[in-house]
Image (cartoon, coloured by chain):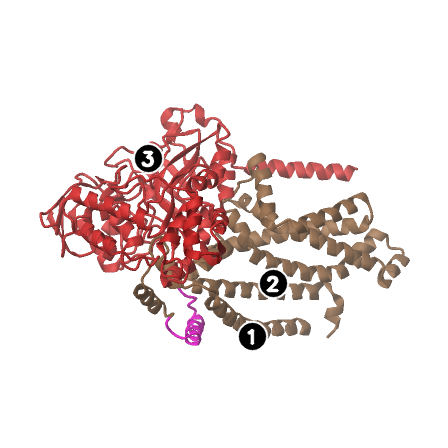
Chain colours: A red, B brown
Amino acid sequence: MKRLFKQIVAVMTFAMVLAGCGSGSADPDASQSSPQANQDRQVVLAAPRDLTPGEKDGYYSSLILQVWEPLVTLGADGSPQPALATGWDMSEDGKEWTISLRDGVAFHDGTDFNADAVIANIERVRQHGPKTSPFYTLDASKTYPGLVSVDKVDDHTVRLMFDEPSPSAIQRLTNFGSPMVSPDCLDENGDFSTHVQGTGPFRITDHVTDQYTILEANDDYWGDTAQVSSVKVLSMPSADSRASALRSGEIQGVLDIGAILPSQAVHLTESDEFVASSRPSTISHFMMVNQSREYLNDPRLVKALSLAIDRQLIVDELYDGYGVASANPLNASELGYIQDKVVYDLPEAKDLANQVLGDQRLSLELLVPQYGIDRYPYKEQAEYIQSQLSELGIDMAITILEGSEQTKRRTEGNFDLALHTQGMPDGDPVTMLKVFMGPNNGGCYSNEQADQLLAQASVELDEQKRMDLYKQLQELALETRPTIPLLHDDYLIVHHRDLEGYDATAYGVTLSTMHWAG
Amino acid sequence: MTNLLRVLARHLIQGVLTLLGITVLSFLLGHIAPGDPAYAILGSDGVTVPTEEQVQVVRESLGLDRSVVEQYFLWLGQLFRGNIGVSFMTNRLIEQELLARIPVTVQLSLLAITFLVLTSLPLGLFLALHKDSLLDHLFLGLTSLFSAVPGFLVALVLILIFAEGLRLLPTSGLNGPTSLILPALAISLGSMTQITRVLRAELLAAFGTEYFQSARAKGFPFRFAAVKHALPNAMSSVLTLWGNYFIAILGGSAVAESIFALPGLGQWVLKSINSHDYPAIQAYVLVMGVLCLMIFLVVDLLQLAIQPRLRRAS
């Protein structure tokens, strides 16, 4: 008995030692300190991946950390908006773009941001690209197609010369299309030799791969400075761990694509402690159809597949309402996007399928990428589609594949149906429409009218006419179905109520306006 | 001394042959698995669908257009020159990745094996001494429960209790020694119950042997005889099991490292497998092979130390 008592005391002592080591509880005195001291408290956030891939990455860190800035950013309506560029002008023939640069801006290492820096950054991509990245591949042939030269007009003006009319050049420079970093932080291979030295409201002061990135406010920022002085961004791959860390108080919020599962957001916000913020994102979800395969090359069957899927049900039940059901391949954040009305009509779908298949049953395979299961409810989505297609006389097998293997099979045309995610590489709607309607599109879709419209939209100099071409292309896509769009994703985050001014954007969060409550 | 040298020589010869076999297997496994690193590299942003030409350029730059045999011998030659390679995905030296990650996984595994030894040894002895008691029955029931529950579920329950509920320990990340307690517990709990059970059974068997009975006949108290005579013999099989479990823990740390966001070898190799990063996967298998051989050697040396029969065998 005496021994048992000793053992209990030992266990309790161990527990108390652990309690002393615990990091879960916040400092009670912190909330009573002065407002400025309060904002000096470090905010801890978590992301599903390391948002700072480092020196070999095209960008070093993600745009959402607000360390580097682009020349041009994306407005709420998808239009290009000034960032480090204050204005731009296209020549009459569309082959020349003159870009004015913001004055009085310096990189974190003190180097001036000017025409020389812009030229160095563009030349870096041209000479050393493509630079791969988990965000977007930095590839001159896609971002600056046909670029002949980039010249300095004066210290704060550059001129981009193209070999053919490039009316969408400025749209392709948005966000990941034009990262501006100090030329002094790059080595001879275009890789980073130090932490990235950007112009953003935060600078990186420490980074440990797959663990964390420390951001400190840049007090010399040209715009409104960040409201908190320090942010620690943890890399936390498990969604359950992120939710637990929020509940335990170790982190105050989450960020990045797939930061929190919709069901977790619903569960967390049942408590008054947490707030969810969401915004239609630049990510869309699709089911690609291989239209070169027998039966699937019949537009009636593709239409039947589309009509048999209740997209609104997928959004409501599988994404807990965080998304927009859509049959439009263009993302809602793109310039010229037209909102479509999704149609679910199972009887008509059955009728169309019957016209194509008759009494026979068709066997198809649906490829599901592993990343879709990790970040989104793709497994449930696939099972729902399987049950719906069964009604049409289609026996669908589900094959889960690692992402790159699925991409390979899609590229080779070795598939029937494939679920996939598509982000917006830049602000040019033609880029996205070409993925599904252009040459070498994954679905083997072929349409002469689409080819003509895409070619016209790429070179049309009149903005209004270009917008009209975007509209025509979307209408054609809705009518002829180069793919089966399912929904546009919401960028969803959850944060503790102690944090204010922290909201989701189309691709990221409002990191610089985030501050402690009170 | 002769025996010690013999053990060392045997391990050295076996080790070299085993490592050679490991290099062949690790190389072939990566190449046989479906998927293409070129697609993984070019499509790492999840948006880019590469063209055949782009894929071909990357394959050539990585040397993947050569025959598998040629690639293997090139890699082997590189290894002999002390160059373990460069990651396909990150372009970083694998040596740097290993140096940063091996300590995390080894620390985690050592803590887990420490938990395992410190709990299974006294518990096995206690239960053997109190056979058929209430505690004995209770523990045997718990053994079945822990054996049936997967490690990741144990991890989530531990987080729920100690991080979310009691807020005693961090949920994840590497931030001081306390960060390793929950993951080490998560990966050792299942093995702990099984090894305790084996030790209990071995001890009970030893209690029925002649040497134990003669020790008792000489007048040694039961507990003394159990610790002095039965335990070293029972330890023989348990020691081998500890060695095996240590290897399993090293390999099985991947799940724990992923859940607890620990930047160890396991988390790294999971990412490498997903991106078909052959050099990284091969390096991981090779490192794990070396670690396994070292563990086998330590286990054999410990066997030699606690088993007089083995020492006298020479």
Amino acid type, callout 2: Ile
Name the chain under label 3: A
Q: Where does label 2 land, which residue?
A: B295
- Residue placed at 20% from the left, 56% from the top? A145
The magenta stretch is B65-86
Label 2 – label 1 distance at C-alpha: 16 Å
Amino acid type, callout 1: Leu
Front residue of A134/A57: it is A134
Front residue of A324/A16: it is A324
Q: Where does label 3 land, which residue?
A: A512
- Residue placed at 56% from the left, 58% from the top? B251
Q: Where does label 1 land, which residue?
A: B17
Q: How many marks?
A: 3
Q: Nearer the viewer, mark 2 or mark 1?
A: 1
Q: Are marks 3 and 1 in contact (CB under 8 Å)?
A: no
Choose the circle earlier in sequence order: 2 or 1: 1
Task: Give the side of residue A193 with respect to residue B234, left or right.
Answer: left
